[in-house]
Amino acid sequence: MIELIDNKEFGGERPLFATHDLKLVNVTIHTGESALKECSNIEAEKCRFEGKYPFWHNDGFTVKDCLFTEGARAALWYSRNLKMTDTRVEAPKMFREMDGIELENVQLPDAEETLWHCTNVKMKHVEVDKGDYLFMHGANIEIEDFKLNGNYSFQYCKNVEIRNATINSKDAFWNTENVTVYDSHLNGEYLGWHSHNLKLVNCHISGTQPLCYAHNLILENCTMGDDADLAFEYSSVDATVKSPIHSVKNPRSGQITAESYGSIIIDKNIKSPGNCELKLWDNQTCFD
């Protein structure tokens, strides 16, 4: 049976430690630590969290229409089966070592070092700012309608699908495996280096030196900005680009088709097999 706690305030150390089957409505958690540690089956609605580490080691909890202030840093760690909706999270270092996360209509305006080592994540209508190192070592991630400002995102992630996103991020998707991005804008230098099986579909790519050292890289009907220069160095790639490419440098293998090339740099440092075909849409071969 669910116990209702309505319009109350708590503070200090572990005020609701190891409680179960609770519904919190209009509750404020003031300064303190670990308010809801080691809990299960918790519902929080219209609540305000001000203290550190409120949800640690929890299994099964929902958070709706709540506010996590800056003081509620590192609020959700080592937990499972979270559903969060219509919530604003102003604290950094959220969501660590978690399995089973659903976020919808969530804002994270200070998301530094957030979503590390998390698996089985679904996100929809989520906005992230100051999100440096977002999703470090994550796996099994589905994202739709997403906005991110923050560098070094998605590093070392596996099995990721992203749709309708704007990602402003230096060094995004480094050392990733099995990532597919649809209908998105990817802005920032050094995109996708050392990735395996990165696939970009109907995406716009900007920023210097994108998609280098990539293995089995696929681009379908993408466009590239004027600043996306020195692309594809040492990558194995199969790309169709519906725009000019400012410059291509020493692609390792595969084929690239584009509207035009500002420059093609093939020099003595190219790596074996060094047989990437560069073509235009009229089937003219630029370099073979």
Image: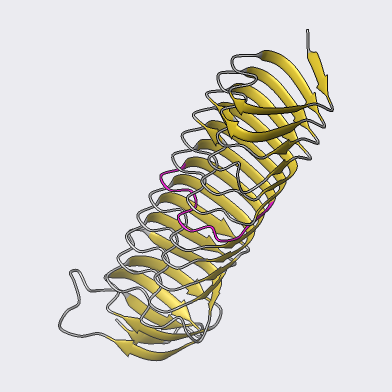
**Numbered-mark total:** 0
Quadrant hosting residue 7: top right
Name the residue located 60 percent from the left edge and 35 percent from the top edge: 101
Q: Is residue 270 above or below residue 220?
A: below
Give x and y (percent) for residue 188: 48, 72
Name the residue located 71 percent from the left edge and 14 percent from the top edge: 21
Boundaries of the magenta span = 126-138
Closer-to-camera residue (234/150): 150
Name the residue located 55 percent from the left edge and 49 percent from the top edge: 92
Closer-to-camera residue (142/223): 142
Q: Is residue 54 above or below residue 209?
A: above
Which quadrant holds the C terminus?
A: bottom left
Q: Is residue 127 magenta?
A: yes
Closer-to-camera residue (36/261): 36
Which quadrant holds the N terminus?
A: top right
Q: Is residue 170 above or below residue 259?
A: above
Q: Residue furthest bottom?
A: 262
Closer-to-camera residue (127/8): 8
Would residue 254 be found to the left or right of residue 273 on screen?
A: right
Would residue 9 be found to the left or right of residue 154 on screen?
A: right
Give x and y (percent) for residue 204: 57, 72
Would residue 109 be found to the left or right of residue 244 on screen?
A: right
Name the residue located 74 percent from the left edge and 25 percent from the top edge: 43
Majority secondary structure in the magenta region: loop
Q: Is residue 87 magenta?
A: no
Quadrant hosting residue 80: top right
Q: Residue furthest left?
A: 268
Quadrant hosting residue 62: top right
Give x and y (percent) for residue 46: 81, 36
